[in-house]
Each structure stands twice: as C-alpha cells, then as structure tokens.
Amino acid sequence: MHIVVDTDRCVGGGQCVMAAPEIFDQNDDDGTVVLLRADPPPDASAAVREAARLCPALAITLVEEEQ
Amino acid sequence: MSATVGHVVVVGASAAGVTVADTLRDEGHDGRITLIGAEPERPYDRPPLSKDVLAGTREPAATALRTHTHYEDRGIELRTGRTVVSADPTAREVQLDTGETLRYDVLVAATGVGPRRLPLGLPHGQRRPHRLAGVHVLRTLHDLAAFRTDMLTAHRVVVVGSGLLGMEVAATCRGLDVGVTVVSRGPAPLHGQFGATVGGKVAALHVEHGVDLRSGVGVADLTEARGRVTGVTLTDRSTVAADVVLVAVGSDPHTGWLADPMRGLDTADGLGCDAYCRAAPGIFAAGDVARWHHPALGAPVRVEHRMNATEQGICVARNILGAAQPYAPVPYAWTDHYDARIQTYGFMGPRHQFAVVEGSLTERRFVVVYGMHGRVTGALAWRYPKGLRRARELVAQTAPWAEIHNRRRTSAAMSTTTAATTTTSLHSRGVLR
C-alpha cells in the first residue's frame, strides 16, 4: 500500500492522526496533514484505511500495489 | 452475515449515503445496494461550495465524492435525479417519483436537510420573496451556479443569517471584492454556535475585512423593481440597497417522505433513532437528517456537520451488518473565514461555561473549552489545530470542569511564549456563565 495526501484539500481535522498516529501527523501551523510514512507496514493497513475513510476532505488516497 | 441483509436501499446520495454504501461493500455485504440521489449530479461534497468553489479556485467537478466509475466498480446501483416520495415500512417498499416501487430489506434515510426560506407572508406586498430574481439559497451545486453568477456582477450582496454558511459566504465574497452586508438576528455572528466571546471575535474579523455587519436585526421586507430584488428593509427600519440577497437562515431535515403518522416513525426534527441509529426494524438514518440518542450525552442530538455524515455512515453500515455498536462520536467541525480556520469538537453554545485553555484571545490564536453541568462538552480552536487535539481528550472523557485548571497550568508551563497571556486570560475570564 502506498499513501498519497493532498495537502491543498486537507482541512486539518486530525482524524487521520487519531486513526493512525504512526503514519500521520499535523503541522503546528495550520494542522495540515504531515505524512510520516508513505509506505506503511502491512500491520498498519487497517488503521490507514480507516484514516482514509474518515477524512472529511477526501485528502488521503491509497494506492494498493498489485502483485 | 450479509446473506441475511438482502437489498439495502439508501435514500440520499451525499456524504452519508455514499459512506454507508461503501462501508457495506468494504465490510462484506455482497448483496444488492441501491443508492438514490435527488440531484442530477453524481455524489459530491458540499463544504467546498461556500469556500473554494464559490471563490472560483476549485472547479465544481472537483467536488465529486468518488471517481466516475466507482459505483459501477463496487456494484452500487446509483440512481441520480430520482426522488423517493414515500416509504411503506410494513411492506418494506419505497415509491419513487417515477411511479416505480422498490422492495428493500434494509432502508437507510440519508436525505439530509434543505435550506429554510424567508417567511412567505412578509408584511409589504404579496410577492413571495424567493420568486424575486436575485434572491438565493445555497445548498446544491445548482444553487451555487445561480448564486455565483449573480454575485460576481453584484455591487452588494446582502447575506440574511449569520450562521456558518452565511459567514463563510460573506468571507468568500469579500475575497472577491464584492460588497457584503450581513443581517444577524443575534448579537453577533455564530453567537448561537460558539457563544458571545468567540462570536465577538468573528464579528471583529469580518468587520476588519469590510463586511457591513448589522447585528440584532432581522429582515422586515424586500424591495423590488420589475421582479428583481433591489434591497432589504430591516426591522429597525433601515434599508440596504442590494442586487443579490442570499438567505442563509438554517435548514430543515428532509423527512416529508417518511412523515405519515400511520408509519409510526418519529419525524419531529429529523428521523428519530435509538443509540444504534435505528428508527424502526430495518430502517436506519445517517447524516444531517438523523436524530439519535447519544449514549454519552444521554440525550437526542442531530448534527449537521460534514464529519458526522462520514462517521455516522460508517456506524450505520456496521450496525446493518450486525455490529450492534452504539454511536457516540465526538463531533468534529471546521469553518474557514479569510485566514482563520475555526475547528471544534463536541457540543457548545451561548449558554455553556467557557474558558480559554491555550493561546490568547487577543492574539487570535487560542483554544477554548465549553462545559455544561460541571462537565466539559466541547472545545474550539482558532488557528490552533494541535492545541485542539490536546483539548479533545477533555471532551471525549466529558472531563469534570475543574480539570481544565490542571490543563491550563500544564499548558502555561509548557509554553513560555504564551504563558503570560494564558494566565491573564484565565484570571480575567474564568468561567463566564
């Protein structure tokens, strides 16, 4: 799984940080998403999917790698 | 599990309805899903309408909630431009405006809200205000296109109502250098949402940006010439000349299709539900239209915010699949005005206790918490998103009001730059009400 975030769309709600704190953070200034790990470990994928689903700005896109 | 679910009909194809459909698919429902939307467009996102789409910095098409092929790819039968006119919970059927009848096993009401309009019987003249050219509401992409066209050539827009929508539109219009008058029934904009102190900050910000703010008055009448609005007369008898009027005086839930008393549903204010967002056997509600029993508050609530549409949609889908999960969110909302973003968690209003916990009101970068009956119920941040996340814990735990004093001490000790102002605002302000 690969994560792409759109910081222009991000509204700084921090839902992603609560869902997957190892993967997402917020910048201090405006709360916009900071991606800590664009390629999360497999055991984080459920939390990352929840983060993407919760994002009220649809700013998180997940690219599933095909084998 | 999903073999017993059968055909899920979701009425309303905006954020809540789309989330219900997607979550059902993601979490194992392989039966039929029909998603019915009244608007002709494929499902789109509403918050940008009063912000970047109105400003012209985002194309209307870029508000799409999902890709064009998403619904087909996921096996979701999307019917746009179709209205459900009634439901029969006994026969488990809904009737469409086409005359068609659809059988369902599970029905989800996600029909949202519609804008309130000015009273029809304004004292002067017989003409209904919303029939005048230049008078608008803003809820849909269709509304947006009409309002935006008029607004771009306007000398002055009068915004009637000073809630979230009205004030965001006022800010966006000022950004385009269009003259704006806001008519606010309350003492300050957003007073009903955030209380007097934050409302006063919002008022000052808008006035600095050139908004002509008329507080504590209502609209008595509209003036017109040849079927087009020419201005408004206020209840203090003053007049404002305007070529465009936006009516943003709140909204009402779309429950007309469920309102027949014979059906035994509670549609007094939205569709009444239990803690699982269930209105009746086989009927659920999500998003703006849902009034449910919040287990942590012990009271029925209805939340008209974007984040709730997603969170409640997820919960409803899981409960359809048998999760039996009470819905107890800490509602999140945000609103943008010029360079200021205001974000909130939980519940707050003019009658709540109020205290600053981080930052300073005078610097216009702060976090405040709200309380009721000795408990923290909400938090608000003005240009202070990380501080808000810290305050969220207090809201999530409905912490005793006394605990905010510890919080203040900690934050003052942590931040030497804001310690002085924090302490000052604490002592002078304390608990206002």
Image: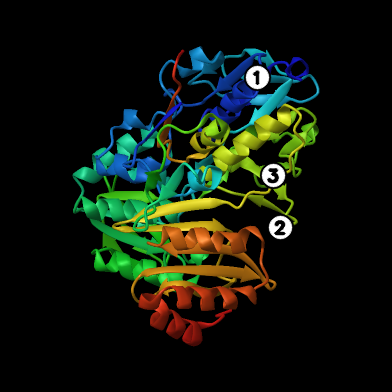
Q: Chain of mark 1?
A: B
Amino acid beneath label 1: Gln
Mark toward the start of the polypeptide (3 vs 2):
2
Left or right for B390, reference B255: left
Residue at the image point whose x is 73% and y is 16% from the top: B6
Relative to residue B405, is residue B365 drawn left or right?
left
Q: Residues within 10 Å of mark 3 (few under 14, many from 20)?
A: many
How far apart are the two marked residues, 3 and 2, measured between alpha carbons?
11 Å
Amino acid type of disc 2?
Leu
Mark found first going from the N terminus, 1 or 2: 1
Of mark 1 and mark 3, the one earlier in the sequence is 1
Q: Measuring 42% from the left and 38% from the top, which residue is drawn there?
A: A37
Give the residue number, with chain letter if any, for mark 1.
B95
Closer to the camera in the image, B198 or B325: B325
Disc assigned to residue B297: 2
Of the two numbered discs 1 and 3 in the rendering, the one whose residue sits closer to the viewer: 3
- The residue carrying mark 3 is B327
Q: Is residue B40 above or below residue B359?
A: above
Taking depth in this image into account, of A61 and B181 the one nearest to the observer is A61
Q: Position of residue B283 (x, y in %)?
A: 73, 30
Picture coordinates of residue B86 (x, y %)? 66, 25
Q: On the same chain: label 1 and label 2?
A: yes
> Does residue A65 appear in this view?
yes
Q: Are marks 3 and 2 on the same chain?
A: yes
Tell me which chain the residue with mark 2 is part of.
Answer: B
Secondary element under disc 1, as helix, strand or loop, is: strand
- Of residue B281 and residue B270, the one placed in the foreground of this image is B281
Q: Which quadrant would residue B210 be assigned to in this image?
A: bottom left
